[in-house]
């Protein structure tokens, strides 16, 4: 089993409910245990004119291979109405493998650590709720250093529901 962190985001069709449904689906993945889920955060879209996003991070322990997990995540996205019409377009659900144990993965379909992690406060701050304080990524960077370089700007903690 490896510890895997999944970034979750939605800005369509009741985003908080989309994330809750995704968490339920993650809890039922084969060979996988849902270990924890961060609080929910709201953030502005990276592109102008889109609704705000609701984001969170889930921690899993899994023995699935990376591409098998990616396929399972994409099946969850599709099951919740995800349409891939435009890059970075609005979406019912986005599930990204942010970290996969201590692996560096560079496949055509999967890059881990996630290639924009250092720029994504909406991933780093929820990740910090779940990960060990001294987390060192497979590429040598530390979560502490990434947080220090990426201020908590444009994020709001989602009100409890």
Image (cartoon, rainbow, N blue to C red):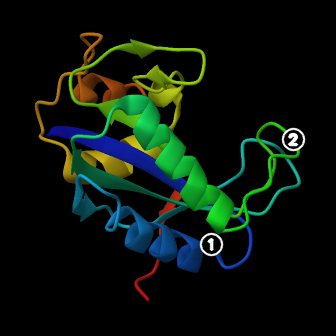
Q: Which of marks 1 and 2 is in front?
A: 2
Q: In which quarter of the image is the N terminus?
A: top left
Q: What element carries label 2?
A: loop
Q: What element carries label 1?
A: helix
Residue at figure coordinates x 70%, y 62% from the top left: 52
Closer to us: 74 or 112: 74
Tell me: residue 113, above or below residue 59: above
Tell me: residue 151, above or below residue 39: above
Residue 47 sits in quarter: top right
Q: Percent from the top left, x then y, of residue 131? A: 19, 44
Q: Which of marks 1 and 2 is nearer the N terminus?
A: 1
Q: Percent from the top left, x then y, of residue 124? A: 39, 40
In the picture of the structure, the residue carrying the numbered disc 2 is 86
Q: In which quarter of the image is the C terminus?
A: bottom left
Evaluate if marks 1 and 2 touch, with contact meaning CB atoms under 8 Å apart: no
Q: Can residue 141 be seen in this view?
A: yes
How packed mark 2 is, by other alpha carbons closer than 10 Å (few <14, some 14-19, many 20 or more), is few
Q: Is residue 60 left or right of residue 75?
A: left
Closer to us: 74 or 37: 74
Q: Percent from the top left, x then y, of residue 25? A: 43, 68
Q: In this view, does 43 lie to the left or right of 59?
A: right
Q: Is residue 99 left or right of residue 25?
A: left
Residue 137 sits in quarter: top left
Residue at figure coordinates x 45%, y 47% from the top left: 7
In the picture of the structure, the residue carrying the numbered disc 1 is 15
Q: Please, which residue is most extreme toward the bottom here?
A: 161
Residue at figure coordinates x 26%, y 29% from the top left: 143
Residue 140 sits in quarter: top left
Q: How far apart are marks 1 and 2 (CA)?
A: 19 Å
Q: Is residue 97 visible?
A: no
Q: Percent from the top left, x then y, of residue 44? A: 68, 54
Residue at figure coordinates x 25%, y 16% from the top left: 138
């Amino acid at each position: 089993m490896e510890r895997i962190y999944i970034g979750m985001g939605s800005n369509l069709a009741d985003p908080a409910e989309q994330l809750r449904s995704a968490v339920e689906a993650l809890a039922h993945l084969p060979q996988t245990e849902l270990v924890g889920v961060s609080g929910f955060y709201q953030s502005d879209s990276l592109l102008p004119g889109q609704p705000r996003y609701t984001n969170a991070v889930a921690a899993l322990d899994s023995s699935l291979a990376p591409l098998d997990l990616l396929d399972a995540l994409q099946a969850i996205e599709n099951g919740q109405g995800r349409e891939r019409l435009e890059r970075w377009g609005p979406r019912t659900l986005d599930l990204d493998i942010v970290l996969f144990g201590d692996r560096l993965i560079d496949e055509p379909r999967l890059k881990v650590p996630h290639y924009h992690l250092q720029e994504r406060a909406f991933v780093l701050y929820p990740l910090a709720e779940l990960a060990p304080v001294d987390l060192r990524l497979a590429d040598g960077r530390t979560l502490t250093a990434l947080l220090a370089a990426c201020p908590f700007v444009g994020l709001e903690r989602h009100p409890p529901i």
